[in-house]
Image (tube, rainbow, N blue to C red):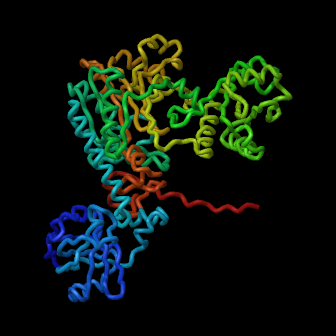
Amino acid sequence: MASSVLKRDHKCAQVNAEMAGQDVCLAGWVNVVRDLGGIIFVELRDSTGKVQLIADPNKNKAIHDQFVDLKNEFVIAIRGKVAKRPEGTAKSESGSGAIEIYPDQFELLNTCRPLPFQLDQGDKVDEALRLKYRYLDLRRPEMNSNLVMRHRVSQAIRKYLDHEGFIEVETPILCKATPEGARDFLVPSRLNPGNWYALPQSPQLFKQTLMISGVDRYYQVARCFRDEDLRADRQPEFTQIDMEFSFVDEDEVMRVTEGLLVDAFKCAGIDIQPPFQRLSYSDAMGLYGSDKPDLRFDLAFKDLTEVAKNCQFKVFKQVAEAGGELKAIVLEGRGESSSRKQLDLWNEYTKSVGGKGLAWIAFGNDTNRSSGLDKHLSVEEIQKIKELCSAKAGDLVLMMADTAKSVANVMGRFRLKLAEELNLIDTNIHSLLWVVDFPLFEYDEEQGRLMAVHHPFTSPRLEDLDSLETAPEKARARAYDIVYNGCEIGGGSIRIHSQELQSRAFAAIGLDNETASEKFGFLLEALESGAPPHGGIALGLDRMIMLLCGCKSIRDVIAFPKTQSGACPMTGAPSLASPEQLKELAVLNEPPKAKVATTLR
């Protein structure tokens, strides 16, 4: 088709009742066509909104004849005068919903074949189909608004960080493979046959090197890559707001981050008030069974281990003597309304997620109901449970005894299930908190050794330095995670800036000098070149936008995401490389072995 003759001078959302009588030229897609006995109504849509067009054969037969053939998603341009809608027909008092246009010029810019799905039914279409035809999916206003939100938040963050004295620096995408917790994506080097680049899991080493280079405050809207199993809030390639500061402590990193989030959340019409609450890792796990607790509701655990240690009930007593815990959740006023069937279902749920079962007591005015605990515990012990739980008549106490790790995991998941099932979450609350004082190391059963909880460049707390050699599992990290409504949206730490301390940290996780030099040689050498104290944080942009837009999946806030198998249905990636390409890269390609069918006998 020939290029457009009509030149757009306004977008749909820019047209309003104050422009009545003004001549405008609009362009976009046909959203809806309605033929009401001769008069044709067309809803024109662009990226900003919609405008109603009217073709009346009594006023302009030529335009009407052209509108007769219009179909949804045809691309058109029109020129006409803005008119106020008749009284009682306006969709809104202001904006484009208050006006209509009778075009006097029309141009068909392109037609549209029958679509694989109707755009106004996109939320009911299988996601695989939406991703295959992503260019259609993104036309939907709700998807477009997600991209607009992402843009606005990114711009607000850039503006804020510029005001705070940060400079934006890009770091390499092709870099050296380093052990950072997930599998690397590898890229073969044609110029260096047999050698490989890795795509960065994060800019960690480079941003620390920038601090040593004298860049006082760095940030980057950084693309990161991790070859790991995917889920609703995880993609193989993702974006993080990456920051690093010289000469700072935890308080300064948190202050800057809180200010950044204030401006980012404003883009979604959400006002948040810093400073945010701070919660130690041990308290978060002990009270909520999670290092990213959702504090929009209470249901904090009550510690009943004291009762377990001194009672004669073997199930409780043996757990306590083995170093385990007895923890409880109190449901206020649910003692009478919780049926035995409901309690049995909750018991089965805790077992399904790794628990040994749920004990319970429903306190009444005169008598109590229980899961049989009255047969094993004395009246005084049951009264002690009531006191430790601050329970009263009508309350339900749900208990679990096991190792501290199992209790935290199972009761933490059970707490979330109860909140959702009983509608305890106030969606008008925006809960932000810092989780601090993480363990520096944790034991990895598969590796058979201690591993860094965050990464091996995280500084231990100064008062825990002596424990690096004597009891490294007890050392705490100068690390901090930011949590929003039960989702971790970022994390960081004060880094090790001393080569001597870095070597001690490597030794604690069994990394000898030779291996450390091979993996991180350039950073270790740089640390001996006058490295300043420094720290930083990375915020997950995709996840933040997902939460601000109220989406269930980060795929809905990424223009061209991958599926759960890491594939792109639209482009067909990943795909096979030609034998010529592989030969040039000195890569041997063994086809995957065919799966052997088996028959159950």
Q: Residue at x 55, y 30 (%)?
A: 444
Residue 508 lies left or right of residue 92; in this view the side is right
Q: Please give left or right for residue 344 compared with residue 28 in the image.
A: right
Query: Farthest residue toward the front?
Result: 87
Q: x, y (%) of residue 225?
A: 38, 44
Q: Quick check: 328 above or below 76? A: above
Question: Where the N terminus falls, by quadrant?
Answer: bottom left
| Residue drawn at point x = 74 percent, y = 18 percent | 309
Q: Quadrant of the C terminus?
A: bottom right
Q: Nearer the viewer, residue 58 or 523?
A: 58
Instruction: Determine the residue positioned at 43% across, 72% down.
Output: 117
Q: Position of residue 447 (x, y in %)?
A: 55, 31
Is residue 509 visible from the viewing direction of this image?
no
Q: In the depicted view, which residue is nearer to us: 274 or 497?
A: 274
Apparent side of residue 441 relative to residue 310 in the rendered image (left or right): left
- Above or below, 445 relative to 49: above
Q: Quadrant of residue 169?
A: top left
Picture residue at 43% right of the left edge, 31% below the top: 481
Q: Is residue 22 above or below residue 202?
A: below
Left or right: 147 as drawn, with respect to 294: left
The one nearer the camera, 590 or 203, is 203
Pinpoint residue 452: horizontal percent, then vertical percent: 47, 27
Tally of marks: 0
Q: In the picture shown, does residue 111 fall above or below 354? A: below
Q: Is residue 222 visible?
A: yes
- Residue 251 % position (x, y): 35, 22
